[in-house]
Image (cartoon, rainbow, N blue to C red):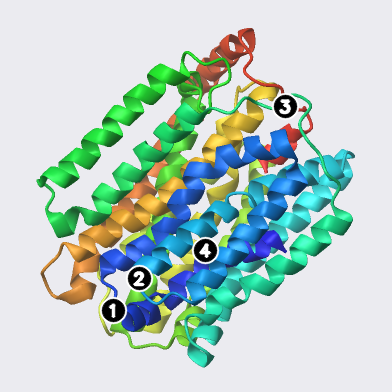
Amino acid sequence: MSVFIAGIDVTIVNVALPSIQHSLHASVTGLQWTIDAYTLVIACLLMLSGSLADRFGRRRVFQIGLSLFSLGSLLCSLAPSLDFLVASRALQAVGGSMLNPVAMSIIANTFPDRKDRARAIGVWGSVAGLSLASGPVLGGVLVSAVGWRSIFWINVPISLAVIVLTQHFVPESKAPHARRLDPAGQGLVIVMLGSVTAAIIEGPNHGWGSGLILGLFLVAAVAAAVLVFVELRRREPLVDPRFFRSPPFAGATLIAVAAYATLGGFLFLNTLYLQNVRGYSALQAGLLTIPMAAMLGVFATVSGRLVAARGPRLSLTLAGPALAIGALMFVGLGAHTTVWYLIVAYLIFGTGSGLVAAPITNTALSGMPADQAGVAGAIASTSRQFGAALGVAVVGAIVAGSSRGGFTTASHGAWAVIAACGLAVLLLGLGSTGAWAQRTAKRNGERLTARPLEEVPDDLTAVTAH
C-alpha cells in the first residue's frame, strides 16, 4: 500500500500540473518546483532514512514516514498559494524518503527464506508498476471530476490505514550493527544537489550570467569537492568516493541520472503539451499516456529477466536507442500531430524506460563486496531521484528561457536534450559493461574489502539488486 501511494505520486501530480498552473497562477518555473521539491528532497534523504531505520527501528521509521507523507499530502490539498504547495511537497517528500527503501528492508527481515522473499519482492514490484500505470488515469479522473486538490486527498486515508496495519502485522527490526550517522556528508549532499537544481530552474528568470546563478553553481562545485575530502576520511561515510573508481558503478550512477532525466522531462513536457497545447482534459491526457506506462511496466519485467539471463549489457543497449528514438519523434511535435503518431512514440519511449530500470542496480553492484551492496544500491537510487529532478529542471529551463513560437516550438530543444540523454544511456552502458570495466571493478572491490565500511546481511544483496 505504501509503494502504491508513493508510486502514484510520481505520475498523478504531473497530470494535474495545468490545473495547478491555472488555479495558483503559476509560471513554468513554479511548476518545476512543484515536481522537484518532491524528487529532490527524496534524493537528498534516501540514504539518511535508511540509516535511521537501521539504527532506530524500521517499523518505527516507516510509520513516521507515513505520518509525514500523510500530513504533507493534506497540506498540499489545502495550499492557498504556490509557495505553500511547494513547501508542503517538500514535507511530503521527507516522509516519502522513509517509505520504499525502508519497506524493502522490512521485506528482507520479514521473509528470511529466499524463495518467500523473492515472491514478496515480486508482489512489491507488481504494485509499483500498477501504481505508475494507474497514476495518469486516476489523476485524470480526479482532476476532471473534483479538481486538482483531490489528488492529494487519496494519500491520507491510505497512509492512516497502513500505519494501523503496520502496527499490527509488521515486526520491529533493527540492524545488528547500524551505520554511524554522517551529518557532515548529509549536509554537503543537500547543498550540492539543491544548488545545482536551483541554479538550473532559476537560470532563465535571473539570467545565466547573474551573480545568483553563478554563485549557486560555485556553491555546488565547492560542496562536491569538500564532500570528497570529508568522506575519504570517515570510516563509515554516507557516500564513499572510492566506489566511483569502479567503472560499472560510476557508469551506473551516470546512467541512472540520464535515464531518469528522460523520464522526468517526458512526464513534465508531455502533460503540458497534451493539456495546454492540444486542449485535452486531464482525463483524456491520462488515458492517452497509458501506452507509455504500460510498456514501461511490461519491459521492466522483461528487463529483469534479460539481466538475470544475459547480464545488463543487452538491456542497456536496447534501452538507450529506444529512449533516443522516442524522444526524437517529439522534436517535430505540432499542435495537430496525429494521435496515432503520439501513441507510437509513447510505446517506443515506454519500452526504453522499462528496459533501463533493472540493469542500473545490477551494474552498480558489479564487483562490489556483498557487505557494501546496500550502500551502493542506495547511491544508485539517489541518482535516479536526482536524475528525475534534473530532467524537470533542464527541460523546464529550456522552455521558460525560449521566446520563440510558444510552448510547442520552445519544447523542440527540450525534446532534443532528452534524446541526447537516451544516447548517453547507450554509450555509458557499452562502456560500463565491457571486459575492461569488469576487471577494474573486480580490483576495486578487492581494495574495498580490505577496509570494510559497514556490515550488511548477505541476504540484502538480492533485495538491493531488485
Q: Disc 3 on helix, strand or loop?
A: loop
Mark-to-mark CA distance, 2 and 4: 19 Å
Query: Disc 3 marks which residue?
Result: 456
Mark-to-mark CA distance, 3 and 2: 42 Å
Query: Disc 4 marks which residue?
Result: 10
Residue 25: image tag: 1
Mark-to-mark CA distance, 1 and 4: 22 Å
Q: Disc 2 on helix, strand or loop?
A: helix
Is the Cβ of the residue at disc 3 closer than 8 Å to that at disc 2?
Answer: no
Q: Disc 4 on helix, strand or loop?
A: helix
Q: Disc 1 on helix, strand or loop?
A: loop
The location of residue 204, given as percent across then percent down, is 17, 58
Residue 82: image tag: 2
Q: Is residue 433 above or below residue 128?
A: above
The location of residue 21, given as percent across then percent down, is 33, 77
* Upstream in sequence: badge 3 or badge 2: 2
* Upstream in sequence: badge 2 or badge 1: 1
Is the Cβ of the residue at disc 2 closer than 8 Å to that at disc 1?
Answer: yes
Foreground mark, 1 or 4? 1
Q: Is residue 437 left or right of residue 32?
A: right
Foreground mark, 3 or 2? 2
Q: Is residue 254 above or below residue 81?
A: above
Q: Amino acid at mark 1?
A: His
Within-10-Å neighbours for mark 3: few <14, some 14–19, many 20+:
some
